[in-house]
Image (tube, helix red, strand yellow):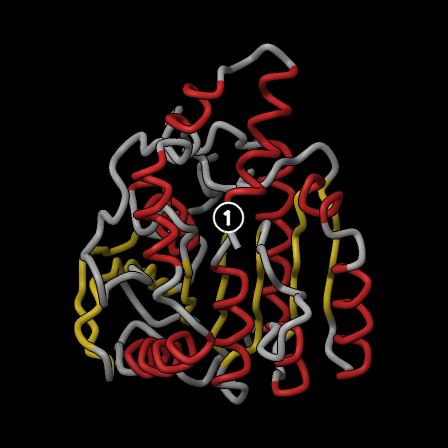
Amino acid sequence: MCDQEYFDDDRRKFEALGQVTRRQFGGIVAAGIAMSLPAVANAVTVTDGDVTITTPDGQCDAYFVHPSTGDAAGVLIWPDIFGLRAAFRQMGKRLAESGYSVLVVNPFYRTKKAPTAAEHADFNDPATRKALMDLRNTLSQTTATTDAKAFIAWLDGQASVDTKRKVGTTGYCMGGPLVFATAAASPARVGAAATFHGGGLVTDKPDSPHLLIPKMKAHFLIAIAENDDTQEPDAKNVLRESFAKAKLPAEIEVYKGTLHGWCPPDSKVYNAEQAEKAWSRMMALFKTALK
């Protein structure tokens, strides 16, 4: 997941390049430089707004955006540790403009409504780091399973969602394990899943996300940051072997020159070229798997 070792590794690389100080790095990771995503070619008109979803554990605040007319395949997005915010609304809207009904959730709703992190949150500040990690630690495979079932059921109840098509799910950083839990919790509904710089997908614990693969039926895209691969070089091989054994298609790639957190456009380590490559691979996956 998005934890201290990943952020410290990214910070050291930037300090070595003389681009940012220790204090500056923590302050700009979450929402440093707002960047506009490329416009969608032939974008459809969309309708969006905030929604509340009832789960067995409470009321989840979320953002829902979908084509203004007709119905489309549903997609559930799990944000990173900084939570539901403008950057993820932007990404959700972009996906909806490509023809999907998109739900972006606040994974920390049990504890706090979005925004769950301050703008320009400084992960290197001890109090901020503790607050973010405390939020992350409220989540588990159990909560992810409960939430995933509730969120997918909610999507299936919307007129803008075509329930004849499979559901997709994506997750960033700590959202990676939540994607695995979602695909395992609703195998009959989830047809495509994608993780971007997901952390903790392979561990030595009995609840390691990769052990859920035999329960899944989804086709996967796993986009790995280069420095994450440096820290866990065997993880990609375990994933490839696990998906092959389960006979599930999985595109697993290390994206050259990327640092943990490189996909959201508000991250200082945002890599536009590689983020677009990952986005295009996700769109290709959805086109073939969400039938």
Q: Residue at x 45, y 35 (%)?
A: 265
User: How many residues crowd around disc 1 within 10 Å: few (fewer than 14), some, or many (20 or more)?
Assistant: some
- Tell me where residue 277 sits by quadrant: top right
| In-front residue for pair 108/47 | 108
| In-front residue for pair 250/2 | 2
Q: Residue at x 39, y 52 (%)?
A: 133
Q: Residue at x 45, y 33 (%)?
A: 267
36 over 135 or under it: above or below: above
- Tell me where residue 73 sits by quadrant: bottom left
Q: Amino acid at mark 1?
A: Asp
Q: Residue furthest top?
A: 18
Image quadrant holding the C terminus, namely: bottom right
- Tell me where residue 57 sits by quadrant: bottom left
Count the marks.
Answer: 1
Pointer 1 residue: 3
Left or right of 133? Residue 62 is left
Q: Residue at x 66, y 35 (%)?
A: 258
28 over 192 or under it: above or below: above
